[in-house]
Amino acid sequence: MESGATTPSRAGKAPAGAGRSRVESGLAFGVLLVLAVLWLVPLAWAVDTALKPESETIVVPVSWIPSHFTLDAFKQVLDAGNILRWYFNSALTSVIITALVVLLASLAAYSFSRVPFRGRGVLFWVVLAGIMIPPQILIVPLFTEMNSLGFINTYQGIILPQIASPIAVFIFKQFFDGIPHELEDAALVDGASRFRIYWQIYLPLSRPAMAAVAIFTFVISWNYWLWPFIALTGTNMMTIPVGLATVQSAYGIHNAQIMASAVLGGLPLLIVFLFFQRQIVEGIAGTGLKG
Amino acid sequence: MEAPERVARPATRTSTTKPTGRRGSNLTGLIFLLPFLIVYTLFLLWPVILGLRMSFFNWSLVGGGASEFLGLQNYRELFGDPVFWVSLWHTGLFTLLSTPPLVLLALVLAMLVNRLRFAQWFFRFSFFAPFVLPVSVVALIWIWLFQPGFGLINSYLTSLGLGEVAWLPDKNVAMITAVLVTVWWTIGFNFVLYLAGLQEIPRDLYDASAVDGAGSLAQARWITIPMLSRTTVLVVVLQILASLKVFDQIYVMYTQGGLNYPATRPIIGYVFDQGFTSYRVGYASAMSYVFFVIILAVSVIWFVVARRRGESA
């Protein structure tokens, strides 16, 4: 979309600078290519190592091409390791967190945006203030709280602290604020309940906001390491980021298996990113520029 | 500011249709909010309050809660604790070292990619992809790259005739290592913010200046960079806030790959160690609060700066 918008005016650029501009574009492309290769090499090396026979991972000088490529490391990790269990834990918690964040935040935002009630302004500021609280400062009291609730090493212990998202409320409220009042007024006159208006008018209209909030929440909760690392004690309860941070000590010197685990751990997110590249990029840009 | 007008309109309408409208609206509003507010209060506000309370006690994770009221003694001990100051210094140093490359390189990358007429998606993918990876994947990959001998980086350094670097264990290098990994991992976020800022600049500014004979460098200096100043303020502040919160990548590279922890342990790391290794949760809470004040101070400064800029513009 963006490139489409810029291309026509570029094409119409003053011809005087065209030659110089072409040289510069070539130069820019060259520099970018070098940097992109630098950025991709770590990922490529991880995949390459994971596809090597174990004995060939520590050859000096290094070589990208082993005697043969093999999926042994992946097989061993999937057979012996806990990675499938960790996938399940990550998927379960992330999906529940995402659904609840979208639901709770959009309900709250609808109220803040459209339903007048006493104390609304103050409450909105109380919620907004939550954006300023870094989750890192909460780890110690949160652990104490969850411990007394008996939620350590449970799914609810992972999920509950992640479902109150002030920033999601803010994004939904901004979106709802932009929806014309007339729609709602007409529905109210017709006797529709507030909940029906929220459910049948506002939620369907807020699809772009919902997509942005959902994708971001999913990626962030899938990747969230600090709190799950503290709250999860059992290997079979671990999520992908927590579990993978134990494999080095667990597998010892099995380099190909460690890299196979890393590749498997990163793969779902890279796939999500490939599918939702536009939403993720626009989501960052949108919230960033408004902030 | 615009709330009163919005409040007034539907309220008068409902009160004309049914007499109990206003009270009904109060109740409806709260019912919509309630699920969020309950979770928000229990798992965000309450820990903030609990943490403040704990910071005034000799509170231990194993001892069973508040044993002895200490007043400000935890805070006093903190300011006399050399390890606290070293950790704070590590956090500051990490922020000082990571912010310039994460801002400047992101700006350069975005300006270069924005020039391209093709393959933009490829570069966007290359620079942003690491950002979606979990910290453990990033740590495992880089620990592997940093190995002595058969590690890719040291192997290449050797074949270039340069000496090997003890990236992870060397106390003089470990912080640089943490910064390098972080730049690779997170630059995509700033890059995307800058790309979005660049799309907002009107094309005719460039066309007009090109007619006047301005070259690319002059355009960058006199159009692009000034027009991006709003984005730059945002990127810098978000980056400082993110860098101050550093912990995850340092800790995972320490436990999984032997990164020199005493030379890199940031303030959050010391909070973690005091809370979950020494079980001194009161002391750790006091430290969390000092850190919170620093974060708030940065945010407030940003708010004031952004406001002033907003007024002058």
Image: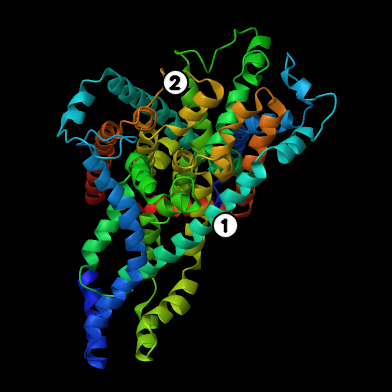
Question: Label 2 neighbourhood size at 10 Å, few (<14), some (14-19), many (20+)?
Answer: some
Query: Is B68 on the left or on the right of A90, as rendered?
Result: left
In the rendered image, residue A173, in percent from the top left (x then y), is placed at 36, 65
* Residue topped by disc 2: B261
Q: Is A95 or B93 nearer to us in this picture? A: A95
In the rendered image, residue A66, in percent from the top left (x then y), is placed at 81, 24
In the rendered image, residue B248, in percent from the top left (x then y), is placed at 46, 33
Q: Tell me the chain of label 1.
A: A
Q: Tell me the chain of label 2.
A: B
**Who's the residue at 65% across and 19% down the image?**
B151
Indicate the amino acid at tag 1: Met
Q: Quadrant of the N terminus of chain B?
A: bottom left
Q: Is A150 or B230 nearer to us in this picture? A: A150
**Who's the residue at 22% across and 44% down the image?**
B304
Q: Is A276 or B142 nearer to us in this picture? A: B142
Q: Which of marks 1 and 2 is in front?
A: 2
In the rendered image, residue A121, in percent from the top left (x then y), is placed at 23, 65
Residue B80, by quadrant, is top left
Res. B215 visible in picture = no
Tag 2 secondary structure: loop
* Residue topped by disc 1: A1
- The scheme the figure's colours follow is rainbow
Specify whether disc 1 shares its chain with disc 2. Answer: no
Query: Is A154 on the left or on the right of A270, as rendered?
Result: left
Indicate the amino acid at tag 2: Tyr
Which disc is residue B15 wearing? none
Q: Is B8 or A49 nearer to us in this picture? A: A49
Res. B34 visible in picture = yes
- Vertical arrangement, residue A212 with respect to residue B170, above or below: below
Residue B36, by quadrant, is bottom left
